[in-house]
Image (cartoon, rainbow, N blue to C red):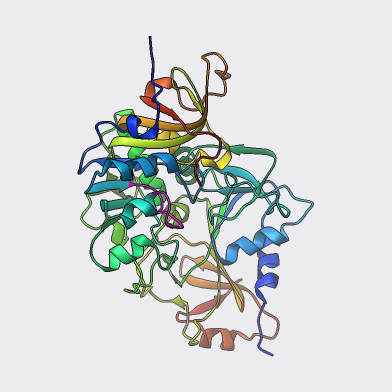
């Protein structure tokens, strides 16, 4: 059996690290899993960029409302205390630094905190960017949830991104199946590793130097 | 006496010409003015520039306009929600131009157009491919991109209710781009489930004040989804 956190373990780990009272946007893809693991004793307010604060879980069968969807266009619910607002307000909220945290997926993150998560230049499909650039620039904290290496085993944490950037020097912390790392002033700092991982093994799967947290 | 009510969607699009820029509300299927999109097809207008967050879904709305070859250019943030959509086919065939804009910048460019703002500096997209060719300026130690306003000849907006003057309320997340687009076009056409008498909407709850609305069409609840 391979070492490392499962996706749900990783989502639960991230959820545990989100403080009570934070306003949070969970990006499309892996980060949406985090919503299933938010600690019930904390009030964490979820933002959806299509104009919702206080997003709740998906509705029961036959209760879906076509006008109540999340940024991934899936039916959701609204919690008591939730609110609707238009798109310019939603992104003013994002750019204006009012969200405490966004958790995004990524193709690559560089040691300087550059983020690449919007296109891999695959010419078979036209590009799409959505709100990725706005979220990466605007939120107070930018965390990344991603696999540590590609399907081919190549590092996704790199010295400099090969894929087109979403934002420069934007990422603060990265949660992967193998480790939790901060982007420090001098590159990646290892905060935590999956059970059984050694620093040497992690270094072999990472494309930039690692330091242990003091 | 103010009368913004039109008998049907086709009549409400009078003046829509070839080459027009049309702002179309909606995010996913929520808030898309489906009846007005169908009516655009019936006008026969071509070479349109469409501004919308997405390029349409399931062959409806914006996707129907693209499929019929009416859209020369789309300005949007996320056009490829389905692998084999009309947009993807037309794009691969080189028959539609794409201007990709970050989602918040898209909304803010329309807000600027509606608010008389000639441009704004934002950190969003600085240092990325989407800023190429744009004027840059360092402000407070960060690179910023100059973004220009985005205005439409027409805005087609879905709302829940209008009153006779054109005050609007929306429904849940179907609000999305509607209130912003309503401010940013020469002619704003609104498709609503219901039009009520003046005074029937709570003035404290009005989202879009009537000054932004030119034409109203009642298409019933939900519209043709």
The front one of A152 and B206 is B206
The front one of A203 and A131 is A131
Q: Residue furthest top?
A: B1
- Let me know if residue A209 is in the magenta part: no
Residue under the point 70% across and 66% down: A12
Whole-percent x and y of residue A153?
50, 87
Query: Seen in the image, is A197 located left or right of residue A128?
Result: right
Query: Seen in the image, is A71 located left or right of residue B156?
Result: right
Above or below A127: residue B7: above
Give the quarter of the figure containing the N terminus of chain B. top left
Residue under the point 38% across and 13% down: B2
Query: Seen in the image, is B67 located left or right of residue B219?
Result: left
Q: Residue furthest right?
A: A41
Whole-percent x and y of residue B143?
31, 52
- Count of picture labels: 0
Above or below A6: residue A25: above
Whole-percent x and y of residue B20?
23, 41
Q: What range is drawn magenta here?
A: B51-61
Residue under the point 32% across and 61% down: B128
Q: Tell me which corner region of the image, top left, top right, bottom left or bottom right, holds residue B67.
A: bottom left
Q: Is residue B164 visible?
A: yes
Q: Is residue B100 visible?
A: no
Whole-percent x and y of residue A211?
54, 76
Above or below B104: residue B125: below
Q: Main secondary structure of the magenta part?
A: loop
- Let me know if residue B56 is in the magenta part: yes
Q: Tell me which corner region of the image, top left, top right, bottom left or bottom right, holds residue B17.
A: top left
């Amino acid at each position: 059996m391979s070492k490392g956190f499962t996706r749900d373990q990783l989502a639960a780990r991230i959820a545990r690290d989100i403080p009570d009272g934070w306003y949070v946007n969970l990006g499309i893809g892996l980060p949406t899993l985090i919503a299933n693991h938010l600690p019930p004793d904390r009030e964490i307010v979820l933002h959806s960029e299509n104009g919702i604060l206080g997003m709740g879980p998906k509705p029961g069968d036959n209760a879906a409302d076509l006008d109540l969807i999340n940024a991934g266009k899936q039916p959701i619910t609204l919690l008591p205390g939730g609110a609707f607002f238009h798109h310019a307000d939603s992104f003013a909220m994002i750019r204006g630094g009012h969200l405490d945290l966004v958790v995004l997926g990524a193709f690559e993150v560089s040691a300087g905190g550059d983020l690449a998560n919007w296109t891999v230049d695959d010419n078979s499909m036209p590009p799409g960017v959505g709100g990725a650039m706005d979220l990466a620039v605007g939120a107070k904290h930018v965390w990344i949830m991603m696999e540590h290496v590609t399907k081919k085993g190549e590092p996704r944490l790199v010295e400099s991104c090969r894929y087109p950037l979403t934002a420069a020097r934007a990422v603060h912390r990265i949660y992967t199946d193998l480790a939790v790392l901060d982007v420090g002033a001098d590159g990646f700092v290892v905060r935590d590793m999956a059970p059984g991982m050694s620093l040497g093994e992690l270094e072999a799967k990472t494309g930039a130097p690692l330091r242990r947290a003091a | 006496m103010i009368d913004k009510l039109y008998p049907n969607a086709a009549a409400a699009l009078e003046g829509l010409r070839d080459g027009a820029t049309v702002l179309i509300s909606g995010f996913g299927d929520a808030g898309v003015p489906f009846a007005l999109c169908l009516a655009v097809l019936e006008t026969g207008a071509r070479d349109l520039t469409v501004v919308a967050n997405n390029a349409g879904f399931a062959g409806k709305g914006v996707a129907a306009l693209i499929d019929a070859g009416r859209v020369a250019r789309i300005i949007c943030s996320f056009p490829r929600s389905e692998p084999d959509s009309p947009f993807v086919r037309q794009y691969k065939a080189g028959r539609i131009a794409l201007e990709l804009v970050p989602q918040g910048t898209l909304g803010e460019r329309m807000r600027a157009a509606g608010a008389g703002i000639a441009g704004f500096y934002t950190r969003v997209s600085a240092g990325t491919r989407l800023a190429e060719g744009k004027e840059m300026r360092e402000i407070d130690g960060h690179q910023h991109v100059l973004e220009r306003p985005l205005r439409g000849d027409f805005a087609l907006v879905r709302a829940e209710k209008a009153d006779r003057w054109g005050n609007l309320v929306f429904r849940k997340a179907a609000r999305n781009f509607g209130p912003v687009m309503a401010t940013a076009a020469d002619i704003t056409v609104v498709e609503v489930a219901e039009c009520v008498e003046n005074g029937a909407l709570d003035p404290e709850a009005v989202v879009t004040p009537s000054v932004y609305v030119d034409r109203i069409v009642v298409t019933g609840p939900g519209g043709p989804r």
